[in-house]
């Protein structure tokens, strides 16, 4: 198991635009994907982008059957997505509290598009294309933002809804989960 250090907000590497993976070579990608999976599992993440572990390539992983950080969230298919492209299916949006492994202990209320289509490739170069809504769509948008050097606070419109999980919880704004080590 290879758990990598997750870069934290303030690291300039998180603000860079990642490069496309060309060509897609499963053998070359295997160590990166193992590190992403192991790190995401160790941190109870819903997803992880390569830039978060210092690799500026357009690679994200996401998905879970159940996740202790999001006990009420529906399952999201476990996915490797390389060179992703997101298309909006409509203009509907919804607000939701987000956290990020690169911003430990913080949460923010972020508006995201509710219905999207995403496409890209898996580690074998096979096309991946799905429609997603709700939490699934939120996870995909959040992870793909990392590939463009965007962290979720940059998507927030009202910084009054940004803070430390314990303080937000104490004030009844958000419910911490048992796996939140900072709760």
Image: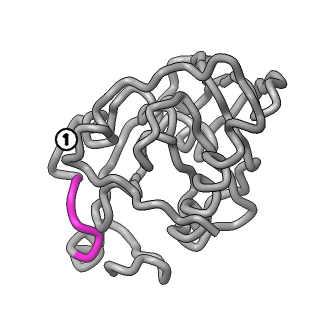
Left or right, 5 with reference to 25: left
- Number of numbered discs on residues: 1
Residue shown at the point (58%, 65%) measured from the top left: 2
Between residues 147 and 3, which one lies in front from this camera angle?
3
Work out whether 8 lies above or below 136: below
The image quarter in which residue 110 lies? top left
Left or right, 2 with reference to 97: right
Quadrant that contains the N terminus: bottom right
Asked whether residue 163 is drawn in magenta, I would say yes
Residue shown at the point (16%, 45%) measured from the top left: 159
Between residues 128 and 20, which one lies in front from this camera angle?
20
Q: Position of residue 171 (x, y in %)?
A: 22, 74
Residue at the front extreme, as displayed: 28
Work out whether 98 lies above or below 136: below
Quadrant that contains the C terminus: bottom left
Residue shown at the point (40%, 57%) measured from the top left: 6
Q: Which residues are magenta?
A: 162-166
Work out whether 50 lies above or below 21: below
What is the crowding at mark 1: few (fewer than 14 residues within 10 Å), some, or many (at least 20)?
few
Asked whether residue 54 is drawn in magenta, I would say no
Q: Position of residue 52 (x, y in %)?
A: 42, 47
Work out whether 113 lies above or below 30: above
Mark 1 secondary-structure assignment: loop
Residue shown at the point (23%, 38%) measured from the top left: 12
The image quarter in which residue 140 lies? top right
* Residue 37 appears in view: yes
Q: Which residue is mark 1?
A: 158
Q: Position of residue 87 (x, y in %)?
A: 60, 16
Report the magenta stretch's main SS: strand
* Residue 99 appears in view: no
């Amino acid at each position: 198991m290879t758990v990598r250090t997750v870069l934290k907000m303030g690291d300039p590497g998180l603000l860079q635009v990642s490069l496309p993976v060309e060509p897609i070579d499963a053998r070359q990608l295997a160590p990166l994907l193992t590190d992403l999976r192991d790190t995401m599992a160790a941190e109870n993440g819903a997803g992880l982008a390569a830039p978060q572990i210092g690799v500026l390539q357009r690679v994200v992983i996401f998905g879970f059957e159940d996740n202790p950080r999001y006990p009420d969230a529906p399952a999201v298919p476990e996915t490797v997505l390389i060179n992703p492209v997101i298309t909006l299916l409509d203009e509907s949006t919804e607000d939701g509290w987000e956290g990020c492994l690169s911003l430990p202990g913080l949460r923010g209320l972020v508006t995201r598009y509710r219905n999207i289509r995403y496409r890209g490739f898996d580690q074998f170069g096979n096309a991946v294309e799905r429609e997603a809504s709700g939490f699934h769509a939120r996870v995909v948008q959040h992870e793909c933002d990392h590939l463009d050097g965007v962290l979720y606070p940059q998507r927030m419109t009202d910084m009054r809804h940004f803070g430390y999980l314990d303080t937000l919880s104490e004030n009844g704004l958000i419910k911490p989960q048992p796996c939140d080590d900072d709760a």
